[in-house]
Image (cartoon, coloured by chain):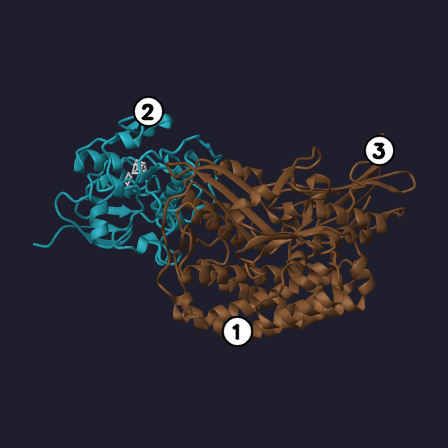
Chain colours: A brown, B cyan
Amino acid sequence: MSNSLETAQHPETLRRIAIDPISRVEGHGKVTILLDENNHIHQVRLHIAEFRGFEKFIQGRPYWEVPVMVQRLCGICPVSHHLAASKALDAIVGAKQLTPTADKIRRLMHHGQMLQSHALHFFHLCSPDLLFGFDSEVSQRNIVGIAAKYPETARRGILLRKYGQEVIRHTAGKRIHGTSSVPGGVNKSLSLAERDELLKDSEEMVAWSRDAVQLVKELHFKNSELYNSFGAFSANIMSLTAADGSMDLYDGQLRGRDAAGHIMFDGVKDQDYTTLIAEQVKNWSYMKFPYLKTLGPEQGWYRVGPLSRVQNCDFIATPLAEIERREFIAYSGKSLLHAPLAYHWTRMIEMLHAAETIRDLLHDNDIMGSDLTVRGERGFEGVGIIEAPRGTLIHHYRVDENDLISMCNLIVSTTHNNQAMNEAVRRVAQQYLHGHEITEGLLNHIEVAIRAFDPCLSCATHALGKMPLEVEVLDASGEQMSYLARAGDGASINC
Amino acid sequence: MNNPTFTLDGKTIPFTEGQTIIQAAIAASVYIPHLCFNPEFKAHGSCKLCTVKANGRKTASCTAQPQPDMIVESNIQELNDERRALLQMLFVEGNHFCPSCEMSGQCQLQATAYELNMMSPHFDHFFPDRPLDASHPEYLLDFNRCILCSLCVQASRDVDGKNVFALAGRGINSHLIVNASQLAETGFSGDDKAAHVCPVGVILKKRVGFVVPVGQRKYDLLPISALAKGD
Ligand code: SF4
Ligand code: FES
């Protein structure tokens, strides 16, 4: 673990490069790099806009509105926010244990989200880099290029995602921004017709997800040196696990391991997350840096998401995903595999787990039950934690005696990964940019590293595989020395 | 003797003595857009959404009475354009955030905007600051959405005999008030008629938001113009 390259000694003497991807939903993400005259790198920072606005304007709103309102902070994984908020607010209405129908409908919705998000990320956003190469011809490096060269892969990617969206539509009411999860339960279950419609293709989705794991695994094996070293850095990891240690993406307790894989903490209840995690503010980023209190801000940062989850749990309860998890663990050896590009492999293992879970839930008649909500003793504070596609997502609310929100704290997955993504970008800058002239292909190396984490900004800006980018090289006095831009259509503009 | 008739957009509509144009239209299952009119209350013609052309002259159909053989035009571009502009003004004067509003799918303002193909608010938002009144244990007032239709004022005064609500201020400063410092201190009760007349999402029963799933909400299946009473 290293924080070198976070702050240069004499920034005033260095050239500054800004890689500026423009984000449509979450605001702005950019990378700045400080170089000397020999193109040696002295400082690299990834900056991402934060969601502070929501924490503020949710205050004073009635609590039952929150699950529907907060999901609007993301157009890509709204279900995660919808569910994390509902889970937090279950405590407000005193719902200690949801009805089986409510619990399973929420889980079904969540795994539908996992399936569609992971499929989108792998097939639409990343497979062009992985199948064609990071600095392959830019006009080909997108889903359209994939469809031309690998039509079956592209077709399955699209249909897997569509299936996940259909699961969401039937459980949440709409494909995006549904309303069915309410404090204390859900407002609908599945009809027999809805269940049958989803059941029809469920086995095929499992089979295709399994093939996707094979595909990404082959890519990893074929280029193992690159995949294991690209942007690699070691880090602590954190995720929820179920009480029995299995992977649980919807609910559970927090577990963390150090970079060597030793368990540092386990069984931390969601309501107690503040005993574990604090957030640090840095003057150069809008996004906070969460860290483990026991280790402090320098050593206590951690990585979340598929790469952490697959290595953090003791087993996966669905059989096919468990076979894949074991193979991954056997491959990584005794300690943890920290390579950012291994995110893809673990993400596909999770997609397989999601597909299996969906199929199994569809065979459970509870999802068609009519007992939808429970109420108990009114509470005034609640925390909901969920494993969103991108990692651990924390929602924390206080509600006053008039039912209005008085405090809201959100720690989103991308924020947990803030330091980790910075580290990855620094490694890649060191490995590939250090001492070189910048080219579009080199720029894409930075993006490939960021994209591996699947941060929201990459989804929002990258639907066609062409993140608009600007790189500006300025000399110490601020004069522009060179400029490279890539338009949203992928064309390079050299100025 | 047969009832007298008038024509509404070419269709023959019978009417009886004392009926307004909109009442006769509703009885004949013809929709005229409206917001401040509710068949259960005396019309007061304030929102102007129901404006029609009667023998070429513009008039509020919720207050105007038809004449035999009158030619009434309602569903014509000129009037619909004006109605859309009125709706857009209502949307920007208050804070109408449909995406997170618990009345979405059950709101007459939203349904009417869909009916009239309102695609954007067009005008600049006012973003007024209107804090909620959550003092009552069972009901919440979210003033952000008030369109000043007066229906709650009428219901509380004329049906409940309570005068809980009133409109205060004039013109652009008009706003809804309650007859105490907050709702909990008025005699308001969930059994009041006033608790159930708001066409938008101001007077809300607490803790039941979003219980109706998407697909089963009032305007999910049919547009407002196809509903029996047109509301
Ligand atoms: S609160 Fe509702 S019923 Fe009362 S005036 Fe406002 S919009 Fe009309
Ligand atoms: S409905 Fe006639 S003026 Fe409002």
Residue A470: percent from left, percent from top: 75, 44
Task: From the viewer's side, name the closer residue of A225 and B227.
Answer: A225
Q: Is residue A472 above or below residue A457?
A: above
Q: Amino acid at mark 3?
A: Gln
Task: From the viewer's side, name the closer residue of A439 and A223.
Answer: A223
Residue B169 - label:
2
Which residue is rendered at x = 25% and y = 51% of the image?
Answer: B229
Residue A320: percent from left, percent from top: 61, 72
Asked whether residue B178 appears in the rendered view, the answer is yes
Residues at marks 1 and 2 touching, judged by CB atoms closer than 8 Å: no
Residue A9 - label:
3
Which residue is rendered at x = 37% and y = 34% of the image?
Answer: B143
Q: Amino acid at mark 1?
A: Asp
Which of the 4 image quarters holds residue A379?
A: top left
Ligand 2, by image quadrant, is top left
Residue lying farthest to the top in this orientation = B169
Q: Are marks 2 and 3 on the same chain?
A: no
Q: Are marks 1 and 3 on the same chain?
A: yes
Residue B129: percent from left, percent from top: 44, 30
Which of the 4 image quarters holds residue B11?
A: bottom left
**Residue under pointer 1:** A201
Q: Amino acid at mark 2?
A: Gly
- What secondary structure is found at the residue carrying circle 1? helix
Q: Are marks 1 and 2 on the same chain?
A: no
Q: Chain of mark 2?
A: B
Q: CA distance from mark 2 to mark 3?
A: 62 Å
The number of discs equals 3
